[in-house]
Amino acid sequence: MVTRRDFLWGASAAGVALSAATVSSVAMAALPQIVSMETPDTQPPLTPENGRPYNPVVTLNGWTLPWRMNNGVKEFHLVAEPVVREMAPGMKAHLWGYNGQSPGPTIEVVEGDRVRIFVTNRLPEHTSIHWHGQRLPNGMDGVTGLTQAGINPGKTFVYEFEAKRPGTFMYHPHADEMTQMAMGMMGFWVTHPKNPQFMAVDRDFVFLLNSFDIDPGSYTPKITTMLDFNLWAFNSRVAPGISPMVARQGDRVRIRVGNLTMTNHPMHLHGHEFVVVGTDGGWTPPNSRWPEVTADIAVGQMRAFEFIADELGDWAFHCHKSHHTMNAMGHDVPTMIGVDQSKLVDRITSLVPDYMSMGESGMADMEKMEMPLPDNTLPMMSGQGQFGGIGMGGMFTTVKIREGLARNDYKDPGIYKHPAGTVAYEINSELPPVQRQTETPSEDGVEFKVRKPMGHSEH
Ligand SMILES: [Cu+2]
């Protein structure tokens, strides 16, 4: 196996140009080289060095798979295999994925490209790949049993089709899906338009929503879980481990999100309105778009939305289901708000040694919880901001908007320096008395009594 730095074909993020002569005819005759990613860090966009030009995307905590051109055909090599994925610093998961990581690499092609994908199976059971949303011959659709035989362990299959429709797609197995998707097997696919000016944006971020059920202290997801997942992830990564999406002030930014969890996710952006410009069914006609600050993404769906990044700052971007912005916890934690537990703990721990008291005044205690956690377990809510604990895990990151960044600069610019007088502040002043209102003035100033509805006849 080789690292990304060693690959010879297709394209290079580092800009290392290699002559065609370095690729021997022997290599061209065999399968394309296997490129494997060793880090969960967000990789810079992979600028194409051959084939038709396009504006590359940035995969959040991911990367784009390099290819080789073989007689005009774009050839990729995906390897389905067990991987160790760091979900956030301090926690690694034993997942299944492709080419060293979960999710697999993003595949980027251009409308009209002839594409050949070699899929090698290094899993202990058969697999297949379904190319979600694509126009292709039925026999390339990747449904085990229905359109092809399963790819047995150790075997390599070839998929070949023309990338007919430009847009945003996903890939995942259609073989023992319950296991293979619960283990993290999925990836993103972008077919760029032939005309690079069509729907061009300054920054184009892509990622998948996925979820896992990994008991605190363990490494492997429970694959029979139907709904009660405890790790809610962007690309198999949870806050505070998710990269920020960095933009230059004034950039047109696109975020494409695919949902391969078992529930819907209302994705919410702070400080800006966006429009949904596309789904996995294609681009949305301009006259049918409307502004939103939250877009619900159902299971198996993709949404592409765009906004002008005109407000400087570190803006939260997260799923609006509050249990999806925290990390692993037991779901049988009782609500303890208002309960003084100080005298109870000693008595309970003599019976239940690992009993933790928490939640006396809400769950914010968890942000500063410094009690020892089991190995390989993330705090439920964590992340440090410049003003203290952020109290978020799971599906949470930031869009960091700064002035004058270079076009290709995706580095974390650090914390936002707020202009003087623009941060919410504490005021020390005596509270005024409470005015208890029992009568509500109507709009024209005539008062009326608030009363309860008397019955259905009044409706
Ligand atoms: Cu959610």
Image (cartoon, rainbow, N blue to C red):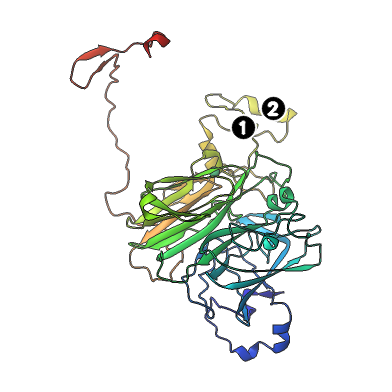
Asked if residue 414 can be seen in this view, the reply is no
In-front residue for pair 137/409: 137
Specify whether 326 is left or right of 306: right
Quadrant assignment, res 80: bottom right
Residue 88 in sight in this render: yes
User: Which of the four quarters of the rendered structure image does ligand 1 lie in?
Assistant: top right
Relative image position of residue 127 (x, y in whole percent): 75, 58
What's under tag 1, amino acid-wise? Ser
Please give left or right for residue 420 compared with residue 326 in the image.
Answer: left
Residue placed furthest toward the left = 445
Tell me where residue 160 appears, x and y as whole percent. Answer: 66, 69
Please state which amino acid type lies under the numbered disc 2.
Ile
Q: Earlier in the sequence, mark 2 or mark 1?
A: 2
Residue beneath label 2, please? 348
- In the structure shown, which secondary structural element does the residue marked by tag 2 occupy? helix
Q: For the residues marked 2 and 1, what is the alpha-carbon distance in whole angstroms?
A: 10 Å
Residue matched to label 1: 357
Are the two marked residues, 2 and 1, in contact with CB atoms closer than 8 angstroms?
A: yes
Question: Where does the image place residue 417, in percent across and percent down from the top left?
Answer: 35, 57
**Closest to the observer, 24 or 332:** 24
- Indicate yes or no: mark 1 CB to ligand 1 under 8 Å: no
The 10 Å Cα crowd at callout 2, few under 14, some 14 to 19, many 20 or more, is: some
Report the front residue among 459 and 148. 148
At numbered mark 1, what does the secondary structure look like: helix, strand or loop? loop
Q: Is residue 182 above or below residue 439?
A: below
Q: Residue furthest bottom?
A: 21
Please say if 289 is above or below 404: above
Quadrant for the N terminus, please.
bottom right
Q: Residue at x 57, y 27 (%)?
A: 336
Residue at 25 percent across and 12 percent down: it is 448
Residue 44 placement, left or right of 313: right
Q: Is mark 2 within 8 Å of ligand 1?
A: no
